[in-house]
């Protein structure tokens, strides 16, 4: 069970702060015998209320050392070259599978895969499609939001920080 002020990853909503635990008084249909989390997304508007025993994915935000280890491992993460379907529906299903684990490593694999696909398309004077762009951006947002919290840095600094770290760790020829 989480505590008030804990930072967690909630489903595909990203980073949320636990603002309260208990029966919400402003929801008349809330079961009085069930306890609820009141969550506030840190990078979005709104409030989420979910029973504490719900089957929705929740986990603590990674630690700084976990974030540093993930960033250090980016160069070795493989790109998935199987995401070449021309069918937006098949491509969408393939990309959705990366989100089911709720792991940054899987989202980074998706990001690297779409990035590589875009580079290949660019050599032929083409660009990637909307499905690729959508899932790339969603994965990037989720990863950068969690890393922003774990590394205690502003969201807009995360991308350049990762690029600098990865470039500094890249082998020189």
Image: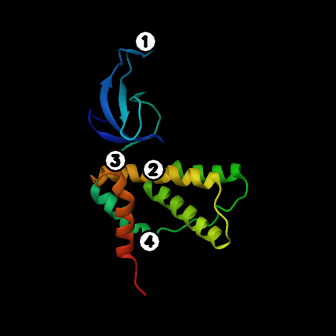
Q: Earlier in the sequence, mark 2 or mark 3?
A: 3
Name the disc covering residue 28, or none: 1
Q: Earlier in the sequence, mark 4 or mark 3?
A: 3
Q: Earlier in the sequence, mark 2 or mark 4?
A: 4
Q: Say few, some or many: other residues with alpha carbon within 10 Å of mark 3 (under 14 / 14 to 19 / 20 or more).
A: many
Q: CA distance from mark 2 to mark 4?
A: 19 Å
Q: CA distance from mark 2 to mark 1?
A: 34 Å
> Circle 4 is placed at which residue position?
75
Q: Quadrant of residue 26?
A: top left
Secondary structure beneath label 3: loop
User: Does 82 sit left or right of 11 as displayed?
Assistant: right
In contact (CB < 8 Å): disc 2 and disc 1 = no
Q: Nearer the viewer, mark 2 or mark 1?
A: 2
Give the position of the C terminus as an image quadrant.
bottom left
Q: Observer-nearest residue: 93 or 44? A: 44
Residue at the extreme bottom of the image, as rendered: 173
Give the image location of residue 52, x and y in percent: 38, 29
Q: Please, is residue 39 above or below residue 150 in the view? A: above
Q: Earlier in the sequence, mark 1 or mark 3?
A: 1
Name the disc covering residue 61, or none: 3
Secondary structure beneath label 2: helix
Q: Please, is residue 63 above or below residue 78 in the view? A: above
Q: Quadrant of residue 51?
A: top left
Name the disc covering residue 170, or none: none
Q: CA distance from mark 1 to mark 4?
A: 51 Å
């Amino acid at each position: 069970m989480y505590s008030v002020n804990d930072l967690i990853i909630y489903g595909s909503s990203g980073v949320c702060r636990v603002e309260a635990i208990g029966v919400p008084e402003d929801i008349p249909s809330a079961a009085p015998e069930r306890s609820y989390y009141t969550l506030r997304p840190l990078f979005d508007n709104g409030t989420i209320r979910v029973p504490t025993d719900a089957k929705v994915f929740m986990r603590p935000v990674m630690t700084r050392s976990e974030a540093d280890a993930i960033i250090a491992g980016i160069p070795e993460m493989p790109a998935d070259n199987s995401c070449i379907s021309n069918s937006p529906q098949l491509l969408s299903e393939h990309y959705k599978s990366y989100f089911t684990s709720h792991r940054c490593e899987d989202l980074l694999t998706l990001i690297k895969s779409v990035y590589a696909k875009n580079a290949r398309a660019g050599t032929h004077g083409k660009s990637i499609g909307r499905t690729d762009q959508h899932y790339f951006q969603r994965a990037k947002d989720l990863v950068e939001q969690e890393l922003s919290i774990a590394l205690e840095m502003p969201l807009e600094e995360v991308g350049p920080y990762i690029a600098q770290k990865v470039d500094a760790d890249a082998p020189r020829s």
